[in-house]
Image (cartoon, helix red, strand yellow):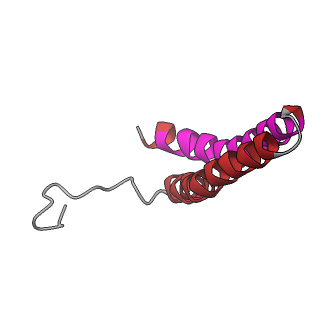
Amino acid sequence: MDVIKKILGVVWIVLGPAAIIFLAAQAYEKINLAAEGAERTNTALQWGIILFIFLPICTGLVIFGYYALRGEYNRLPADSASGKN
């Protein structure tokens, strides 16, 4: 199980930046396809909000993957109240 956690850690580390790159490419494409004026401004605002929301989520994926790769999740507490194994 620990090997699976480490493999998934690498997956999360790669998935975070890949998602941001994909979203940025989509934003660029959709903004350029929008008509001039208010429609383009609204599209840019919507994609700006989407990127603003997903940037911390993708950062969290990278941090989560880093901890999984380091083995921080190998020993989990048996009881959430005591915090002991």
Residue at (73%, 42%) from the top-left corner? 43
Magenta span has 26?
yes
Q: Residue 41 location in percent, x, y?
A: 78, 49
Residue at (68%, 42%) from the top-left corner? 19
Q: Depth check: 48 or 57 in front?
A: 48
Residue at (12%, 57%) from the top-left corner? 79
Q: Is residue 25 above or below residue 63?
A: above
Q: Is residue 66 above or below residue 47?
A: below
Q: Depth check: 35 or 47 in front?
A: 35
Of all residues shown, which one is farthest toward the top? 33
Which quadrant would the N terminus be assigned to in this image? top left
Q: Main secondary structure of the magenta part?
A: helix
Which quadrant would the C terminus be assigned to in this image? bottom left
* Extent of the magenta region: 5-32
Q: Residue 32 location in percent, x, y?
A: 89, 38
Magenta span has 29?
yes
State which quadrant residue 75 falls in.
Answer: bottom left
Q: Is residue 52 above or below residue 39?
A: below
Residue at (62%, 40%) from the top-left corner? 11
Of all residues shown, which one is farthest toward the front? 37
Is residue 41 found left or right of 52 in the rendered image? right
Q: Depth check: 16 or 64 in front?
A: 16
Is residue 26 found left or right of 84 in the rendered image? right
Q: Residue 60 location in percent, x, y?
A: 54, 57
Q: Residue 12 location in percent, x, y?
A: 59, 45
Is residue 31 found left or right of 54 in the rendered image? right
Q: Depth check: 69 or 24 in front?
A: 24
